[in-house]
Amino acid sequence: MKLLSIIALYSLFLSLPESNCIITQNGINDIVIDSSHFKEVTPEFGIMKSSKEWQSSVEMELFGSYKYIKTFPNEGIVFYAEREKGKKIINDIVLTEGCICKTEDGIGVGSSYQDLSNAFGQPYFNNDKRKPSIRYEPNMYIKLTKGERVLQITYNNFHITMSSTDTTVSKIKKIRVL
């Protein structure tokens, strides 16, 4: 019995920092897009898996740059950075299944379309994503991803992918903070 109490307290202690994960218009917690350095992620979120990918330029495979990636295992958080003036600056954050981060309005991965539109406003449907809507934001279009059609919604710095095109049952599948 004493062991179960210790385990319960320990798990509660470990979950406290995660419950303070807030999605803002500019990033997550104190990590700010186009401003924060890659090295600031570890103190904020702990040890993460690091990797890098070669991004070819359009003209030739020979030219390009590395995109640096930090992944929080099993937590659905991925940070992307590119080197600017010798420093790795975060330019993209992707939140997927397993991420418990939420906006101040309670919106996060798994939230319904209704919750999203109540918090941020009803998106304008644009059937041609290449042309911006008349009102620009929020903007919604249908996207073909891995053989399935999903709703893609843009609210300011958020690019949100829904689980389907049916807004009555659709849930947020991915949030990209740019």
Image: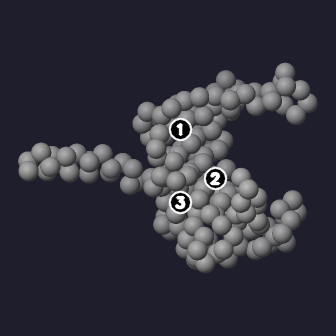
Q: Where is residue 52 in the image (x, y as percent from the top left)?
A: 64, 28
Q: Please tell me whether residue 52 is drawn above or below residue 168 in the rendered image.
A: above
Q: Residue at x 81, y 70 (%)?
A: 126
Q: Is mark 2 on a helix, strand or loop?
A: strand
The one nearer the camera, 133 or 35, is 133
Which residue matches tag 3? 109
First in sequence, mark 3 or 1: give its number: 1
Q: Left or right: where does residue 98 sit relative to residue 120?
A: left
Q: How crowded is mark 3: few (under 14 residues within 10 Å), some or many (20 or more)?
A: many
The residues tagged by marks 2 and 1 sit, at their Cα atoms, a distance apart of 14 Å
Of circles 2 and 3, the one toward us is: 3
Q: Position of residue 159 (x, y in %)?
A: 68, 57
First in sequence, mark 2 or 1: give its number: 1
The residues tagged by marks 3 and 1 sit, at their Cα atoms, a distance apart of 17 Å
In this picture the colour scheme is one colour
| Mark identifier at residue 71 | 1
Which residue matches tag 2? 176
Q: Is mark 3 on a helix, strand or loop?
A: loop
Dot 1 amino acid type:
Thr
Q: Residue at x 71, y 52 (%)?
A: 146
Q: How crowded is mark 2: few (under 14 residues within 10 Å), some or many (20 or more)?
A: some
Q: Left or right: where does residue 51 sit relative to residue 147?
A: left
Q: Is residue 119 visible?
A: no
Q: Where is residue 103 in the image (x, y as percent from the top left)?
A: 51, 61
Q: Which residue is drawn at 69% across and 70% down?
A: 165
Dot 3 amino acid type:
Val
Quarter of the view holding residue 144: bottom right
Q: Which residue occupies the extreme left position in the image?
A: 2
Q: Please tell me whether residue 153 is drawn above or below residue 36 in the rendered image.
A: below
| Mark identifier at residue 18 | none
Q: Is residue 157 visible?
A: yes
Dot 2 amino acid type:
Arg
